[in-house]
Amino acid sequence: MNLTRISFQNLKWEGIGEGDKQAWAKAYPACDIEIELAKMAEWLKANPNKKKSNYRRFITNWLSRAQDHGGTWGTAAAGKIKRKRMIKVFHRDGTFHEEEIEE
């Protein structure tokens, strides 16, 4: 496993793979992982005296709190986000078709 850390010269995360991002996206579905990682980087830049010894734990805790507060866009914006999903529409003759709907 690569060491997860941030480069303070360019505010880029190192040691984070696509598998990590996919796992976080699954665990924290209300969070946009890329946006949250950028927010973390800016927070770390603004708080240089609060450097972390375990960035992976920092990321997980951050995402957990963000998820608990409604995700990246928060609970107030949650109603404004259109989500698409597939539904099955059944016909009287026993057949069905699928439709995409927005909620």
Image (spheres, rainbow, N blue to C red):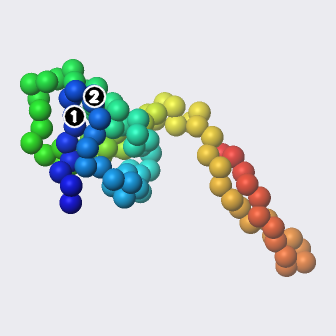
Q: Is residue 83 above or below residue 18?
A: above
Q: Amino acid at mark 1?
A: Ser
Q: Residue furthest top?
A: 46
Q: Is mark 2 in CB contact (under 8 Å) with mark 1?
A: yes
In this view of the protein, can residue 23 be seen by the observer? Answer: no
Q: Amino acid at mark 2?
A: Asn
Residue 41 lies in what quarter of the image? Answer: top left
SS at mark 1?
strand
In this view of the protein, can residue 15 be seen by the observer? Answer: yes
Give the Cα separation between the discs numbered 2 and 1: 6 Å
Q: What crowding class fits label 1: few (fewer than 14 Cα within 10 Å), some (14-19), or many (20 or more)?
A: few
Q: Which mark is residue 7?
A: 1
Q: Residue furthest front?
A: 9
- Viewport quadrant of the C terminus: top right
Image spot of residue 80 (x, y percent):
59, 33
Residue sitting nearer the eye, 22 or 75: 22
User: Mark 2 highlights which residue?
Assistant: 10
Residue 26 lies in what quarter of the image? Answer: bottom left
Residue 48 lies in what quarter of the image? Answer: top left
SS at mark 2?
loop
Q: Is residue 93 above or below residue 51?
A: below
